[in-house]
Image (cartoon, rainbow, N blue to C red):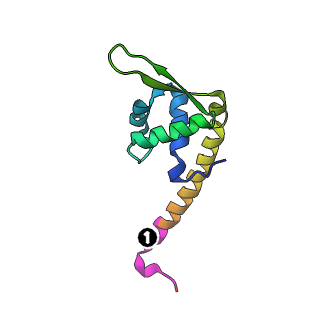
Amino acid sequence: MTELEPRNILQPCLRLLLREQPDHGYDLAVRLRPMHDGEGDPGSVYRVLRGLERQGLVRSEWHRSSTGPARRTYYITADGMAGLDDLADGLRTTRAAVQVFLERHARIAARGAGGRRP
């Protein structure tokens, strides 16, 4: 399983969004903003989507539009859905570890700088 550091969160987020509904890359970037602090940079989103597609976790199709250029729609595959629960479990474990860190840090910070021990 991929290490679930903040820099690796984009992949599970995109898989979750595609599980909710197929979408275009730009629209995925917009929907991603509340979940990811990278401001939904479309360039990063497209790079990750291409990587997911190479891994067989996502597929895409071009769709013509009567009002503009053709757009690529992304879909999650069965393989992409299969690992999503494992990714969620990994994120829950990471969240628990971060929570412990933050609570301990808050206790130390509350004591102030004078609370340091040699």
User: How many numbered marks appear?
Assistant: 1
Measuring 54% from the left and 49% from the top, which residue is drawn there?
8
Residue 78 spot, x, y in % from top left:
65, 27
**Residue 28 drawn in magenta:** no
In the image, the segment drawn in magenta is: 106-117
Between residue 29 and residue 59, name the one nearer to us.
Answer: 59
Q: Is residue 100 shown left or right of residue 38?
A: right
Measuring 38% from the left and 35% from the top, which residue is drawn there?
30
Rate crowding at label 1 as few (under 14), some (14 to 19) or many (20 or more) other CA atoms within 10 Å.
Answer: few
Give the answer, above or below, for where 86 lies relative to 4: above
Give the answer, above or below, for where 101 lies relative to 93: below
Between residue 64 and residue 79, name the one nearer to us.
Answer: 64
Between residue 54 and residue 74, name the one nearer to us.
Answer: 54
Q: Main secondary structure of the magenta part?
A: helix
Q: The residue under label 1 is which amino acid type?
A: Ala
**Residue 111 drawn in magenta:** yes
